[in-house]
Image (tube, rainbow, N blue to C red):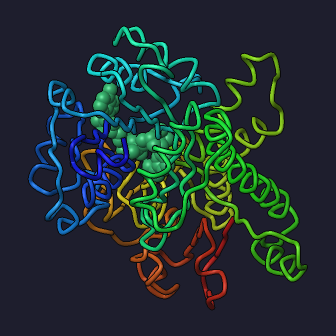
Amino acid sequence: MYQKLLNKERKIAVIGLGYVGLPIALEFAKHFSVIGFDINEEKVKMMQNHEDPSKEVKTEAFKGKDILFTADSEDLKQAHFFVVAVPTPVDEHKVPNLKPVISASNTVGKVLKKGDYVVYESTVYPGCTEEDCLPLLEKNSGLNGGTDFKIGYSPERINPGDKKNTIATITKIVSGNDAEALREISQVYGRIITAGIYEAESIKVAEAAKVIENAQRDLNISFMNELSIIFDRMGINTHHVINAAATKWNFQRFYPGLVGGHCIGVDPYYLTHKAQKLGYSPQVILSGRRINDGMPAFVAKKTVKLLIKAGRDPKHAKVLVLGITFKENVSDIRNSKVADLVKELQDFSVAVDLYDPNASADEVKDEYGLKTVDKIGQDYDAVIIAVNHDEFKSWGVADYKKIMTVKPILIDVKGVLLDKPKDGVEYWSL
Ligand SMILES: NC(=O)c1ccc[n+]([C@@H]2O[C@H](COP(=O)([O-])OP(=O)(O)OC[C@H]3O[C@@H](n4cnc5c(N)ncnc54)[C@H](O)[C@@H]3O)[C@@H](O)[C@H]2O)c1
């Protein structure tokens, strides 16, 4: 397969062109002939015009690439190596929502031919590729997996907003249903990944590796968040404690914060769901999730306490919240915990101005029913730096002070201004 792809006798199709799918499709298109397929016609049109709907990929990256962007599944008939990168969210009960993966598997199954390859990149629980997706590929194609066609799993580890660690420079885990599949899949990815390929023992191992990377991060942050709740009662700052503790050689630095987005706060539920199905009720993983999900309420409550301490009636207070994206310097607002923070403050009857130069006001309105302001106002009783966008980091304490009333309160969720002088400002960070 690899040689045929390289000679352009065969094509690669990438199914789902979001944060993960588009960069990988463009990377493949430097060496192979690629079909980029997405069900969202509007997004496909933008990509045909060399525009990334997620704003992560620059126009230049589209130039000179051998790629056809399409929303027509008929075009997939020309492909022989399929890469599936559709979303894997959870529903309102935190249960994995496999609808996009199921739908993509049905689409691929309908165009699958003998000798083809299907590699899943979406983050799933161990077993999903072989137990949930493979039967759909077989049913729709009438072919036998393993003999008629091969499958594999290769998790994606890109980090949106990170310009240093990009697809090519992050070691890629690959796996396949047998030795031949592993070799071919490894070669295909090896062509685009400069950092190296790690061949996992099985598809399940590769699936599990991805999901624990994010569960580990979630848990480490939840420990820091719990410490932050404890240290707040003691009147000491968690960052100061971390700095002191980190002077020991084996202490690992993690920081408290709001854990949002579509990966860290979501993927652990894929693991816990599968564990529960197998009769084990995870405790550590889920308690970490509970702590992290409770942090917006903790920050809101702290803000209200500080307002009251400053003699303000929360009902008449005006607070500016800076940032709504799930993390710094990205436009992605999915699963933003700042939205929970704003709603908590509004539940205390606090008037909130929400400002984020990186986020689309329409998306914020559609997703959370929240209005953003185009311009920062004046006379705020408190300012909350919720997301560390570079723009907010470039302002000094004096700049924040200027837009606040006489007893300014600065809530610096991530502690970016912790070591700056804060004369005349009531300052608090997690
Ligand atoms: N975004 C990240 O940082 C990141 C990092 C590593 C892994 N992942 C994982 O990668 C997967 C994709 O995530 P993402 O952030 O790129 O999602 P995304 O929402 O940005 O993009 C997914 C794309 O798939 C399309 N799509 C949905 N259903 C489809 C279908 N049936 N057929 C074709 N296209 C379909 C959507 O229109 C969308 O454009 C998820 O499993 C995610 O957990 C994401």
Which quadrant holds the N terminus?
top left
Residue positioned 77% across, 39% down in the render = 285
Which quadrant holds the C terminus?
bottom right
Q: Position of residue 378 (x, y in %)?
A: 36, 72
In the image, is 362 to the left or to the right of 220? left
Q: Quadrant of residue 425?
A: bottom right
In the image, is 7 to the left or to the right of 147? left
Q: Quadrant of residue 79?
A: top left
Q: Position of residue 12 (x, y in %)?
A: 29, 42
In the figure, 412 relative to 308: above or below? below
Residue positioned 35% across, 46% down in the render = 21
Residue positioned 65% across, 81% down in the render = 418
In the figure, 30 relative to 367: above or below? below
Q: Is residue 84 visible?
A: yes
Q: Position of residue 323 (x, y in %)?
A: 43, 61
Residue positioned 65% across, 33% down in the render = 204
Picture quadrant of ligand 1:
top left
Give 323 or 148, whichever is nearer the viewer: 148
Give 192 or 358, whichever is nearer the viewer: 192
In the figure, 231 relative to 149: above or below? below
In the figure, 32 relative to 193: above or below? above
Give 345 or 330, whichever is nearer the viewer: 330
In the image, is 377 to the left or to the right of 346? left
Q: Position of residue 389 (x, y in %)?
A: 44, 70
